[in-house]
Amino acid sequence: MRRLNILQISSSLGWGGREMYPITLSQKLLERGHNLNLIAHPEGNILKRAVPAKIPTIPMNIHKYIDIKSIFTLSRIIKRENIEIIHSHFATDLWIIVPAAILSGINPAVILTRHMKSHRNKKDIGHRLIYNYVSKVIANSELVKECLLESHPLTQDKIPVIYYGLDLTKYDPGRYNGMQIKQEFNIDNKTKVVGIVGRLDPGKGQEYFLQSAKLILNSYPEIILLIVGEDIGAEGYKNYLINLAQELGISEKVIFTGQRDDIPEVMAALDVFVFTSKAEAFGLVLIEAMAMCKPIVGFRTGAIEEIVEDGINGILIPFGDVTALADKILDLLMDTQKAMNMGKEGRRITEEKFDLDQAGTQTIKLYEEVLSD
């Protein structure tokens, strides 16, 4: 295997799991022996996490769309590092990357990973010119691929699907028992815990979780509900949820943990994982729960059906059906064996489809293919 000179780029400030994926991928590429640098926003969360992870980083504030200074700066980096592959994780960065790649004179291949859906029409002449230079646009789900085909000047062969991968040595249920979380929040070891993980945002639908909790507690009062995440970019939503819990009369059963960096330990403390997002392009938190052997109850929205097999490793219900959500969560709380079997199936599916080693191999193979064209 030839050692490649790779430049990963993301100008996102980076907060959620999706934004952090360039770090995870970079670590895997470095483990495989490739030369790599990661360009990230000087004040962003990506840079803050990449440095202690010992990923070679280049702080750079890439301005949106055309910016002459950024183009020349990036061009010099490409030439200095003799970059063969530029892998972007933020679509607007292409307006800097493509001119810089051309200006550098060494003609590196440009690849974009599209982490979110986009229904905006981008088939104008400007986008056609930009995407004509891009070798491949990786979609993180079939759903995202469909959206790209509808809205971008791209053909089927130019959009490979590579699912997110997890480091399954980190997300290993044998390493955690959830006791740290239960002790931190004074939860009795025998008390069952139902949880939802993700930034607090209307798009994540935490209000449906609370509404279902009210119904569950009527039949199964000995549970605790964990809401994990912070209201980054959705000011006021956390207060709305706190007030809703009070209105529903369930405040004493709900714990808002805030942002957590110990997600495997959090998952280990859960008996059932709930997913109420309105439209996820992928749902990284789903495979985190699956890797930790947690059964899932979620709304049938976005790309969830590419991850959760209904009746196998989770239960899918129509979006917004709070009564069904409560019934299915209650079913798994009451039927421990069923919940355990679904959790085991989730781990199996994660090992088969969402292993970081597999994602790394697919990405490197793609790099080699575009360089050989």
Image (tube, rainbow, N blue to C red):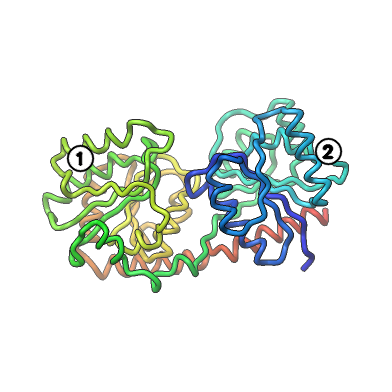
Please tell me in which quadrant of the rendered image residue 134 appears.
top right
Q: Position of residue 181 (x, y in %)?
A: 30, 60
Amino acid type of disc 2?
Ile
Side (left or right) of 20 relative to 86 = left
Q: Decide which of tag 2 and tag 1 comes sooner along the chain.
A: 2
Image quarter (top left, top right, bottom left or bottom right) of the N terminus: bottom right
Left or right of 113? Residue 197 is: left
Q: Which mark is residue 272?
A: none
Instruction: Give residue 102's mark.
Output: 2
Q: Depth check: 334 or 300 in front?
A: 334
Whether residue 88 sits left or right of residue 323 in the image: it is right
Which of the 4 image quarters holds residue 27? bottom right
x 40%, y 67%: residue = 345
SS for dot 2: helix
Residue 81: percent from the left, percent from the top? 80, 51
Please name the amino acid that badge 1 sits on.
Answer: Ala
Q: Are marks 2 and 1 in contact (CB under 8 Å)?
A: no
Question: Residue at (59%, 66%) from the top-left corner?
Answer: 357
Q: Quick one: 201 or 130, which is closer to the camera?
A: 201
